[in-house]
């Protein structure tokens, strides 16, 4: 009878699925990696899973050295991987990390090669699936470097790894973290030039020269103290992207573009002789660079220096730059057609903008700029916020004030004899006119009173 009762209770428990709560505790023999708390093995017998007394777990590993070590692939079917900062990665990264088939180290001692040229000679047929990384340790390397496609040159630091020669760029190569003393040349090539110091006191003189349709990415370099130009791009289609660089103290000027249409953005272009940016074109050749969000200053303050200077069929878009402490902020020569929009143009020794162009099939546009505190004491000519010399620009929606030192005025078109500006919807206080007045409406003074153009 007792056995039947026990059997009945057992059947009753399983019939009603009563949960059974339990804990299993396994105590190891120590607390280091020298002893194991628990392990399993197969029939070979190979250890398949092991937990050491220090908490390290190995799967397919006999002696794991980290909290989890796996001999094989890990498959996460949902949820992804959570990192210490709390972020979760649910998919594989497709950018930011580059893998290389081959890595060479160049060093004065202890590397694979003692010269960059020697490492280049060992790069066998690089291609997108067979890229090379050449790591160059600190030191001075007295050689010219002829880059190869799909090779990444990584210096040990732009203050410590010196290439005392010319670097010739190649398509799809990267030149990074060097001090380059004889400049970079891109003849029809489009490398990435990144995080370098570049100067040139040699025969070529320019910091970076681009020609024959080269389109390099020039990013966050210091280009300084060259005997020539900081950056010189010429020939149709030579359109680099120039972003985030410091371009300083170059003798012939900061950037010069001839028949080219680069993107020039977020650079600090300061204290270069003659001009910050020089633009020129040829009739029938597309030369329309975009110049935006740069700081351009201290170009020969009292000696003819110009922040942005354009001649001969250049049609730039000049947007949201800060241009100050040059002799002239922007100079617009005949046969040019810029759009000058949303800039801060201030504290230039003579005029903020000088315009002597009727445009190229369309007028010069000067719109939504803040032009103030130009025409400084002791300046002698072109004393104005905007000085128009026999030209017909559209001047609209600008704030042009306080350009009054030493007799300067906000707008001066007194020399116009055959062409006159259209001046509408601006704020200005002082205007100097020719005998024939300009057209335009709805201008006011800084105090809100109507003022005729």
Image (tube, rainbow, N blue to C red):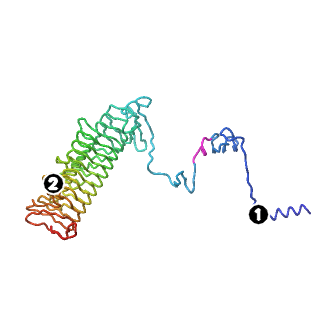
User: Magenta region's main secondary structure?
Assistant: loop
The percent position of residue 88, horizontal first and vertical second, equals 52, 55
In this rendering, position of residue 291 left or right of residue 105: left
Answer with mark 1 or mark 2, whichever residue precedes in sequence: 1
Picture residue at 41% right of the left edge, 44% below the top? 128
Q: Is residue 167 above or below residue 447?
A: above
- Residue 5, horizontal then vertical, whole percent: 88, 63
Residue at (85% x, 64% y) in the render? 8
* Residue depicted at x 20% and y 56%: 374
Q: x%, y% of residue 55?
A: 65, 45
Location of residue 404 with respect to 38 vertically, above or below: below
Q: Nearer the viewer, mark 1 or mark 2?
A: 2
Q: Is residue 255 magenta?
A: no
Indicate which disc residue 18 carries.
1
In the picture of the structure, the residue carrying the numbered disc 2 is 333
Front one among 35 and 445 = 445
**Residue 210, image x, y percentages:** 26, 44
Q: Is residue 164 above or below residue 69?
A: above
């Amino acid at each position: 009878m007792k056995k039947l009762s026990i059997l009945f209770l057992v059947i009753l428990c399983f019939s009603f699925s009563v949960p059974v709560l339990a804990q299993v505790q396994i105590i190891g023999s120590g607390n280091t990696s020298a002893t194991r708390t628990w392990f399993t093995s197969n029939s070979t017998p190979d250890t398949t899973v092991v937990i050491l007394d220090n908490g390290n777990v190995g799967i397919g590993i006999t002696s794991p050295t980290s909290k989890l070590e796996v001999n094989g692939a890990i498959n996460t079917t949902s949820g992804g991987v959570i990192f210490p900062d709390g972020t979760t990665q649910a998919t594989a990264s497709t950018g930011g990390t580059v893998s290389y088939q081959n890595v060479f180290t160049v060093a004065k001692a202890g590397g694979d090669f003692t010269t960059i040229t020697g490492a280049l000679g060992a790069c066998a047929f690089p291609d997108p699936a067979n890229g090379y990384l050449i790591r160059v340790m600190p030191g001075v390397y007295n050689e010219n470097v002829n880059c190869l496609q799909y090779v990444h040159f990584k210096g040990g630091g732009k203050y410590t790894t010196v290439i005392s020669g010319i670097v010739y760029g190649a398509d799809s190569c990267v030149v990074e973290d060097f001090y380059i003393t004889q400049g970079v040349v891109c003849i029809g090539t489009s490398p990435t030039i990144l995080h370098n110091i570049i100067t040139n006191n040699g025969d070529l003189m320019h910091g970076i020269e681009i020609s024959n349709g080269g389109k390099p990415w020039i990013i966050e370099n210091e280009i300084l103290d060259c005997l020539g130009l900081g950056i010189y791009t010429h020939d149709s289609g030579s359109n680099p992207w120039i972003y985030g660089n410091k371009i300083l103290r170059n003798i012939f000027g900061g950037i010069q573009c001839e028949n080219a249409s680069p993107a020039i953005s977020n650079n600090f272009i300061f204290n270069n002789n003659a001009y910050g940016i020089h633009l020129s074109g040829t009739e029938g050749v597309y030369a329309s660079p975009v110049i935006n969000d740069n700081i351009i200053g201290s170009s020969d303050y009292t000696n003819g220096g110009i922040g942005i200077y354009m001649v001969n069929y250049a049609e730039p878009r000049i947007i949201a730059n800060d241009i100050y402490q040059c002799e002239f902020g922007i100079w617009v020569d005949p046969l040019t057609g810029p759009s000058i929009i949303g800039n801060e143009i201030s504290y230039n020794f003579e005029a903020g903008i000088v315009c002597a162009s009727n445009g190229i099939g369309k007028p010069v546009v000067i719109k939504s700029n803040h032009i103030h505190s130009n025409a400084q004491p002791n300046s002698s000519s072109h004393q104005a916020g905007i000085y128009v010399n026999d030209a017909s620009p559209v001047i609209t929606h600008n704030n042009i004030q306080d350009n009054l030192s030493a007799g300067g005025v906000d707008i001066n078109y007194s020399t116009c004899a055959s062409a006159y500006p259209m001046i509408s919807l601006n704020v200005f206080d002082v205007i100097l006119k020719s005998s024939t007045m300009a057209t335009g409406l709805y201008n006011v003074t800084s105090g809100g009173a109507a003022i005729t153009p």
